[in-house]
Image (tube, rainbow, N blue to C red):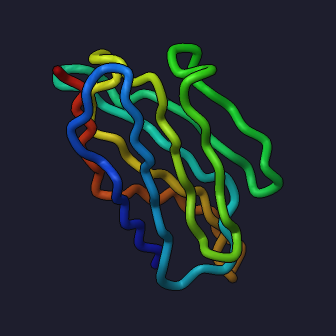
Amino acid sequence: QIRLVESGGGLVQPGGSLRLSCVASGSIFRINTMGWYRQAPGKQRDLVATVTRLGSTNYADSVKGRFAISRDNAKNTVYLQMNSLEPEDTAVYYCNVDETSREGLRNSAWGQGTQVTVSS
C-alpha cells in the first residue's frame, strides 16, 4: 500500500511563494501520473496540476504561468512551486498518485492535505 506525505503549506502574503512537496512511500512498484488538487471551503476538489512519469505537465487555467509542477522519480516525490500567490489560491492542497502494483492493478492514492492560506 502506498502512503503519501505532503509538506510545505502555510500562511503567505499575496504575491508570495510557497513550495509544496509530496513523498510517496510503502509498497511501490510503478508510479504513473502524480498531481496536485485543491479544495477551498464549501467547494469541490479541483485539479491544480499533473505530471506524467515522462514529465508531461498539465495545469488548471487559473494557475498557468504562476505554478510549476515537477517530480523526482528516484525519490518518488512531486513538487509544486507556487509563485505570485493570490487570496483565491487559499485551499487545502492534496497530493494524488496514480500507481500500478506488481500484480498490474491500478490504484489512486491521496495524501492527507496541506493548508495554504494567502492573506495579508
- Determine the residue positioned at 28% across, 57% down: 112
Q: Position of residue 88 (x, y in %)?
A: 31, 16
> Compared with residue 99, is residue 40 higher up or lower down, i.e. above or below?
above
- Determine the residue positioned at 60% across, 71% down: 76
Q: Does residue 22 appear left or right of residue 74 in this picture?
A: left
Q: Nearer the viewer, residue 43 or 20?
A: 20
> Compared with residue 109, is residue 15 higher up or lower down, i.e. above or below?
above
| Residue located farthest toward the right when viewing the structure as drawn | 54
Q: Position of residue 86 (x, y in %)?
A: 35, 18
- Determine the residue positioned at 55% across, 46% down: 35
Q: Nearer the viewer, residue 105 or 9?
A: 9
Q: Quadrant of the C terminus?
A: top left
> Compared with residue 22, is residue 2 higher up or lower down, i.e. above or below?
below
Q: Nearer the viewer, residue 103 or 22?
A: 22
Q: Position of residue 68 (x, y in %)?
A: 60, 37
Rendered image quadrant of residue 72: bottom right
Q: Does residue 93 appear left or right of residue 82 in this picture?
A: left
Report the number of numbered marks. Answer: 0
